[in-house]
Amino acid sequence: MDDLSLFSLFLFTNNTIYFSIFRPSCRNKSNLIKTKSLVSPSPQSQWQGKVRLTKWYSTYSQKERSKVIRELTGIILSRGPKLCNFVEWRGLKVVYKRYAGLYFSMCIDQDDNELETLDIIHHYVEMLDRYFLNAYYILDELLLAGELQESSRRTIARLVAAQDSLVETAREQASLLGDLVK
Amino acid sequence: MNPFSSGTRLRDMIRAIRACKTAAEERGVVRKECAAIRAAINENDNDYRHRNLAKLMFIHMLGYPTHFGQMECLKLIASSEFPEKRIGYLGLMLLLDERQEVLMLVTNSLKQDLNHSNQYIVGLALCALGNICSAEMARDLAPEVERLLQFRDPNTRKKAALCAIRIIRKVPDLAENFINPAAALLKEKHHGVLITGVQLCTDLCKASADALEYFREKCTEGLVKTLKDVANSPYAPEYDIAGITDPFLHIRLLKLLRVLGQGDADASDLMNDILAQVATKTESNKNAGNAILYECVETIMSIEDNGGLRVLAINILGRFLSNRDNNIRYVALNMLMKAITVDAQAVQRHRATILECVKDSDASIRKRALELVYLLINESNVKPLTKELIDYLEVSDQEFKGDLTAKICSIIAKFSPEKIWYIDQMLKVLSEAGNFVKDEVWHALIVVISNASDLHGYTVRALYRALQTSVEQESLVRVAVWCIGEYGDMLINNVGMLDIEDPITVTESDAVDIIELAIKRHTSDLTTKAMSLIALLKLSSRFPSCSERIRDIIVQNRGNLVLELQQRSIEFNSIIQKHQNIRSALVERMPVLDEATFIGRRAGSMPATVSTSNGASLNLPNGVAKPSAAPLVDLLDLSLDDAPAPSSSGGDFLQDLLGVDLSPASNQSGTNQASKTGTDVLLDLLSIETPPVQSSSSPPDVLSSIQDNKSPVASLEELALPSSLSGQATTPVGAAPMMDLLDGFVSNPPKPENNGSVYPSVVAFESSALRITFDFSKPPGNPQTTSVQATFTNLSPNVYTDFIFQAAVPKFLQLHLDPASSNTLPATGNGSITQNLRVTNSQHGKKSLVMRIRIAYKINDKDVLEEGQISNFPRGL
């Protein structure tokens, strides 16, 4: 199986939630999150400011999606460093946080808890930090239908690892089989 | 295996794309990859299907179309192996959404996977279902999910619980199936299951009143106990965040308790103690703790009253508000908005701090604070708070000025204790941020000024002064120009001097100067310039000494490229030059504008709203004499404009016209004449951005527009004679129709049966055998509803029996048919059937009526069916 982690990015939404992670700079993901120092944005890179991962929990057409991403990227990237992590947008609230050069954001309803959403993002980032593979799969163990699924990091890690080993086993068997056929 | 179909590895493709220097280069690489993937799809290549899908997902994220790969997802999902399924489901969630029909094909695979023996495969299917399921899939698969809520593996149970949330959001009817299994989840010890179970219960309570009642009765105590256990639990590394055990679970429990406690005193009582404990014992030095406090405050505010707890909650918010962390202050402001309905006094205590937040550098906080201040304002504090806000207006960011101005204007309009204060504050706002003021706001200001007769002098002088310094604020200029035009004499003579005023000396030519400035400034827009021209016309009569100079300024616009200005210029010039005798009457001061009418118009409750679709249309409240002069002014303007050759008769004609319409209303002829030009202003004033009526430059235009928009006709009708204009209005109007129309006014005898109906009848349907006419009337007080009387006439020599009329309307209309007067229609028009219809137009003012009809009847026992569509309803019904 090809390594999915190379295109590390996502976001999600439900009728409430939309979550995105922007990654304005940075090429080497492994020290992205671990190093707390900011990676200086390289201006000539057209990869700057591109969204790496999105996950949508409510229905948006492809066109609406790119419009939303464009709008939000503009709003979030233009905000200064010391401001609060919440932006009101189209009657929803966007909670975002910057980790090194990566922006994580999540769109929630008016009456959702903003502070908790920050913790969810942090929860996710910690998972990525520990286990930087397959960001999508981690997300799918963390959130479902836009709602939090698991508050234990250990459980999430265990579940993703178990599934990865299933994939691994299947691959070994396949190659074994391939050898036999030869 | 085809060596060409394998293509590059995912890693290599990503590298190649990232290496691209230009967008064109990137497109090239993507195109090549897509072509290879398509080829592989066509060859049904199994070995690299997962790799191709992974590539497609990457390409999709770059924003390229990938619909051709959708079927590949389904094939991977249908495969028996876990790795294939895993990437297949990932692709499904990424590339498809619930609206795609392809998704229907996956329902079967999902069903199989939900019953799979491997719990991870079940998990994949639940995850996909929870993220993209449609209403139809929800119905099909709900039983499987319900069963999985009791599955032995906790990780499957929690996924099933969240999946159930999506299902009941899509199909709320399914809620009751989940009530019992959801209640069972609340007893779990596993945090993941407990969290998802609590969330499911919260959603069930929102979807179904039965569920709410059930959980309130059966589960409140248990939930309180669970919350107590979690809050008191010792350090648990697995769930610990900043020293707190599982804040996520805390928050979700508090949220569910809020739903249960709302509107139920007993349930609220049960949770008082634990809420007090959470509110006092939770550490507030970390984000997680604050998140819990925040949720706890919201719960306290929402459940049934307990004074002590609320004091506690407001104190927490006070602490939040003075926190240095912007996030905390933001949520405090957010929560205070909710608290204000519970305890306004307590929130008022924090007024000073909140006002400071309006001036914060963070736009999110400013916005919240401004909305909160708006809610805090009452009669007693409106003056100091407004002053603060207006002072801040001077220094605020440009992008914030729009919001701020709108709120200040709304505050002033809502709470103003007296007119002079209103005018003063509005002038300040206009001078500071006139460009951000919405049209209806300065329209309202003019109405207020016009009604404050003792303040006319004061206002015009204050505006004159303000204009010296803030000439770039468009709406200030407009209001000033209007007031100088109306009350210019008071400006010069210092009439109605108030004690608080400093006397100023303004000469007649100063006043003209300032209007000249407005008209010549290149940034002035059409409305300002047009208003300036009217002001000049008025001043030409008020200041005879400047008359020549004013005419010069007016004449300069004779060649203006904007038709509107050109026309006004020519007309006004002609009034000044040729019609001295009527000028002073023509430009008399505007009658006091009717506040009630204006407010009604703003609220949109009047039957007449200005239609913007047709530049020449103008709907006005029928029966209001003043504004209804407007269409007449158009005729008048046109006659001046149109009569260069018989110019002498133009004047007579004008007189005729005035005579015609004034004779029946002799007692108010003065007012009517005075409003002649006034109405132009009124037009601008009321018609907002539409080019005013005069912009249709030739008579046929105006007449045709009158024809298709009956309201001006209606107003004319009201004013002139109560004659039915229907015949006039529906007959095509020829090249020289002006006189006809006027003749129509004079010669048509009043028809007694036309009692108040202002819409002409129409022939709705006509065939060789049948004619249907519609007569319209509007019940007073309900602009959306129209009563239609349909009259059926038989044009054939045969009697129609079993006559049935049916009608259908689009969704925005509601139709009610009364029984017909008979079901037999005598031959050759020897009688008719009438039937009443009542149509309610929910899009009144936006869409016109339209109706499809079908008529069935029998001639000599032979069935006849006729059908048609009626779209020639008068507008504005």
Image: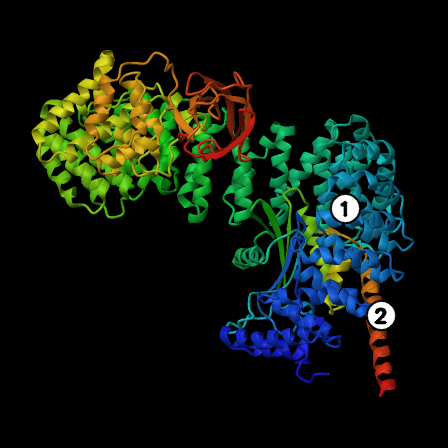
Q: Which mark is residue A166?
A: 2
Q: Vertical placement of B801 versus B71: above or below?
A: above
Amino acid at the residue labelled 2: Leu
**Residue B513 place in picture, x, y as percent:** 17, 38
Where, quadrant-wise, is the C terminus of chain B in this rendering?
top left
Front residue of B136 and B412? B136
Identity of the residue drawn at 78% across and 40% down: B175
**Residue B487 place in picture, x, y as percent:** 23, 26
Front residue of B473 and A110? A110
**Residue annotated with mark 1:** B139
Residue A26 appears in the figure: yes
Identity of the residue drawn at 22% across and 36% down: B532
Residue A136 appears in the figure: no
Residue farthest front in this picture: B860
The answer to whether A175 appears left or right of B563 in the picture is right
Q: Vertical placement of B813 versus A51: above or below?
A: above
